[in-house]
Amino acid sequence: MSCGPRRDGECLAQIKEIEERTHVSNQKTATIVRVEPTIEKETRSEEELDLPWQVVVHNDPVNLMSYVTMVFQRVFGYPREKAERHMLEVHQNGRSILWSGMREPAELYVQQLHGYLLLATLEKTC
Amino acid sequence: MEIRRRKNQIEISELDPFLAELLRQIPASANPDGAPAAEQRLFSPPTTGKDAEICAEWKLYVEPELRRLFQSATETVAGDLEQLNGNEKTLANHTLRIPAKHADAWLSALNQARLVITAKNNFTENELNDHFRSPIGSRRDLSLFQVNFYGFLQEFILRELDS
């Protein structure tokens, strides 16, 4: 590591000064009572963050079947057959899991589906 | 009424005054103001549970975006519908030409209108599937006809997009 352009000996003196300051500082801190940080509220554990999220589409009687198929093709890039399978699952079972993975892209998919006025939700995998 | 694709346009011709008026009603019908059920349907929650954090973020960041998106679609449709203005009183048939590039805006506006009308009237699934209900004897019947007519237009636009 370079300490920049200085005259001979100046750099060494600066290092020495820093070392002395650090030493003094270390001696001082030895007398201070160390306080352990307390976690008041844990919002999300690592385990929770790792759990995959699901994008679920729910049945509604208004949206046309052909429209829902088109939306699945556009949003998820699914081929027509796969999009139709999901559409029929929504129609017959009331819901279908369209995608699962990380929370951020899942949220984006739900946002896009809402933009097409579909009833879509984000659910955490159990 | 005839509906066909002509080059880069979808042409709806032989529109009688009644159907022309129903088309003019699309932007107003898509407005959920004053109907909490309709508002709730257009801006549905992003989770089924009670995840307050996600719902709060959604209201703050996503809903305004969705509002802009829906409004932009209805404005495009309102612009196209200006072709029908000016001779509302005459009994002559009308022709409406929709640029193909506006197809997505029409799909959205028609969908918004169908959802809002359904929510306002609290139509059941059975009523919505009853396509042979006639004649129109009440305001409710008229609203149901409107939902089905808009659905028919959506089907046609989707077929055109598909082909």
Image (cartoon, rainbow, N blue to C red):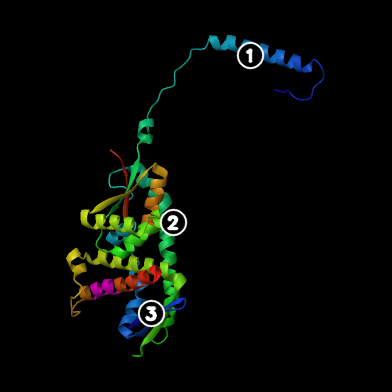
Range of residues picked out in magenta: B142-149
The image position of residue A30, as x and y in percent, is 54, 9
Figure quadrant of residue B87: bottom left
CA separation, marks 3 and 2?
A: 33 Å
Residue picked out by circle 2: B65
Instruction: Give coordinates of residue B144: x percent, y percent.
Output: 23, 72
**Which of labels 3 and 2 is toward the front?**
3
User: In the depicted view, which residue is nearer to us: A126 or A4?
Assistant: A126
Query: Could you tell me which chain the residue with mark 3 belongs to?
Result: B
Question: Are the residues tagged 3 and 2 within 8 Å (C-beta)?
Answer: no
Place of residue B53 in the rendered image (x, y in percent of width and height, measured from the top left): 36, 42
Q: Secondary structure at mark 1?
A: helix
Query: What residue would you read off at disc 3?
Result: B4
> Chain ID for label 1?
A
Q: Is residue B62 visible?
A: yes
Q: Which mark is residue A22?
A: 1
